Amino acid sequence: MMTITLTAADWAALLLHFLSLSLLAIGGAISTLPDMHRILVDENHWLLDSQFSASVALAQAAPGPNVLFVALLGWNVGLNASGATAGSALAWVYGLAGMGVAMLGVLMPSTTLTLVASRWAHHNRELRSVRAFKQGMAPVVMALLVATGWILALNLGKTLDHWPLWLLSIASAVVVWRTRLHLLWLLGAGAVLGWFGLV
């Protein structure tokens, strides 16, 4: 754990950034992961690379919606801002505050926009513009998901020493792209390979 100091302006900036990312989360919150990494790790140094990767990995392994990683990122920012030992009352308060700010920011705009837009699109589903919009967004979503995978892969290792991880990532992408094999089989295979220390 690291110790950081967050002012009221920093908390507001965190909320504002997650509010804006919420409107860009076309393929789900996970598609905004590269920009979250840029803000939380690279620019503001509110999280360590290891905290960022662990938050994403833990949330993706847990059952439930994939937006859970945002709560964990906020929780870790709060813990770092508390400067207290893990498990203390102060750490809990700051962790919950960070989690609340991050989740409010990422959920409020997209939820409101989705509700309004989906009602309108369903009512006007036969319009050519609605069909064209849906078809045009597919490549954007795919590009955002590829960028997310790239960021996570770089956090695992940037050198050729980690070639098994790169090979596994590429093989998984090809299998998902070219077959109908369920993604959970690939996650299970990756877990088994990791368990035996092969990747």
Image (tube, helix red, strand yellow):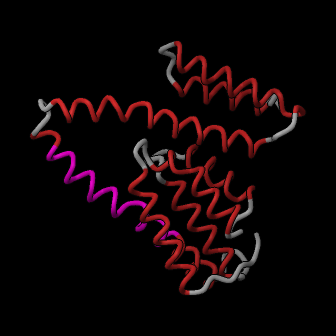
Left or right: 117 in relation to 184 = left
Query: Where does the C terminus fall, quadrant-wise?
Result: top right
When the figure is inspected, residue 32 is found, relative to residue 19, above or below; the finding is above
Residue 168 is one of the magenta-drawn residues? no
Q: Position of residue 62 (x, y in %)?
A: 54, 46
Q: Quadrant of residue 153?
A: top right
View extreme (right): residue: 161
Which residue is rendered at x = 12% and y = 30% of the image? 126
Which residue is rendered at x = 76% and y = 69% of the image? 1
**Closest to the observer: 138 or 62?**
138
Q: Main secondary structure of the magenta part?
A: helix
Q: Quadrant of residue 81?
A: bottom right
When the figure is inspected, residue 146 is found, relative to residue 172, above or below; the finding is below
Which residue is rendered at x = 43% and y = 62% of the image? 20
**Closest to the observer: 109 or 127?**
127
Q: Position of residue 179 (x, y in %)?
A: 51, 13
Left or right: 32 in relation to 156 = left
Question: What segment is highlighted magenta in the picture?
Answer: 99-120
Residue 117 is one of the magenta-drawn residues? yes
**Closest to the observer: 48 or 94?**
48
Total numbered labels: 0
Q: Position of residue 176 (x, y in %)?
A: 54, 21
**Closest to the observer: 71 or 106?**
106
Q: Position of residue 8 (x, y in %)?
A: 54, 86
When the figure is inspected, residue 146 is found, relative to residue 63, above or below; the finding is above
Which residue is rendered at x = 49% and y = 45% of the image? 63
